[in-house]
Image (cartoon, rainbow, N blue to C red):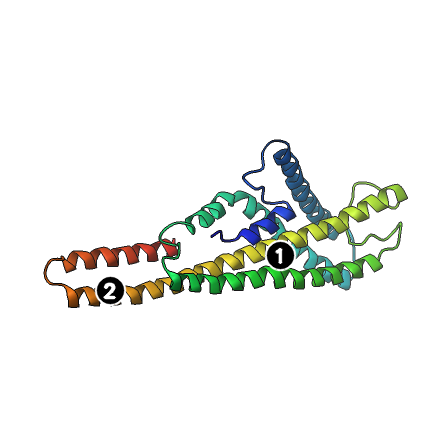
């Protein structure tokens, strides 16, 4: 079984996660896509910051800009986090395919499937809700456009964007930056939340294994005729459970 498969697929779509099997030209094109997403989001944030500092604007616009800039600032860190900690996320996924995290019996499979269904609902419902909210926000700014003077979003540019041949590419750039940032935001939030739920599944499995451990030790003590070193078996079984607990904490 592969955990976070749906979440990693979303990260691939938004441009911050290249699948390992992609090589050659496909990998080069995807790295270019990653660069575009990173540059667009960072430059849009910079444009908003410069505009906020260099222009005198009213209170309503200040509030709108501050809320947008704070969101873009967190998106910037989310992009950097995914790219920088990719190896740790891969290790997280790979370790869950191995012992002691891999379900050992049908009861553990049921526990895993219960939380896997929750993560599936998150990856479906959260993007749907987020898409509706972002679409509503973007449509409002699109209707506010007044070519060639008013852009969809406030921003500072090192050229005169009121010229028609510059206005529309700049407007498309702003709209793409917002959509890209929103996609990165929902992809990051869903994968982080899913990781927490998979860890919750492991804590439930840990509790189940403890109850099973107690039952097995009681059975060994009752049925032992002296041929088995019960103390050694007990030490080994409890040691394995403690190691599993430490692995979850790690």
Q: Which residue is mark 1?
A: 186
For residue 79, side relative to residue 109 (left or right): right
Asked which quadrant contains residue 16, the reply is top right
Residue 234 in the image, given as x and y percentages of width and height: 20, 59
Residue 215: mark in rendering:
none
Q: Which residue appears farthest toward the left when viewing the image? A: 226
Q: Is residue 87 left or right of residue 14?
A: left
Q: CA distance from mark 2 to mark 1?
A: 45 Å
- Position of 3 with respect to 15 (left or right) is left
Tell me the element at label 1.
Answer: helix
Tally of numbered discs: 2
Please tell me whether mark 2 or mark 1 is closer to you in this view. 2
Q: Is residue 104 visible?
A: yes
Query: Which type of secondary structure does the marked residue at label 2 adopt?
Result: helix
| Position of 28 relative to 112 (above/below) | above
Q: Residue at x 52, y 58 (%)?
A: 194
Q: Position of residue 14 (x, y in %)?
A: 64, 48
Q: Is residue 72 left or right of residue 5?
A: right
- Name the residue beneath numbered marker 2: 216
The one nearer the camera, 1 or 16, is: 1
Q: Residue at x 25, y 59 (%)?
A: 238
Residue 161 in view here:
no
């Amino acid at each position: 079984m592969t955990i976070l498969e749906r979440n990693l697929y979303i990260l691939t779509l938004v441009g911050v996660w290249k699948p390992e099997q992609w090589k050659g030209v496909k990998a080069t094109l995807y790295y270019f896509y990653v660069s575009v997403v990173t540059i667009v989001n960072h430059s849009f944030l910079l444009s908003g910051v410069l505009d906020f500092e260099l222009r005198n604007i009213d209170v309503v616009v200040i509030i709108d800009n501050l809320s947008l800039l704070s969101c873009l600032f967190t998106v910037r860190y989310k992009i950097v986090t995914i790219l920088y900690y990719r190896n740790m996320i891969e290790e997280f996924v790979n370790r869950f395919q191995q012992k002691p995290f891999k379900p050992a019996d049908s009861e553990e499979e049921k526990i895993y499937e219960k939380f896997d269904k929750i993560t599936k609902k998150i990856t479906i419902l959260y993007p749907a809700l987020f898409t509706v909210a972002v679409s509503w926000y973007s449509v409002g700014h699109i209707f506010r456009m007044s070519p060639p003077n008013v852009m969809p979003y406030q921003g500072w540019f090192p050229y005169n964007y009121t010229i028609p041949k510059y206005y529309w590419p700049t407007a498309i750039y702003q709209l793409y930056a917002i959509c890209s940032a929103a996609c990165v935001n929902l992809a990051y939030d869903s994968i982080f939340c899913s990781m927490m739920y998979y860890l919750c599944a492991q804590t439930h499995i840990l509790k189940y294994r403890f109850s099973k451990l107690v039952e097995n030790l009681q059975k060994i003590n009752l049925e032992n005729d002296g041929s088995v070193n019960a103390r050694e078996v007990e030490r080994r079984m409890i040691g394995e459970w403690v190691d599993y607990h430490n692995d979850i904490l790690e």
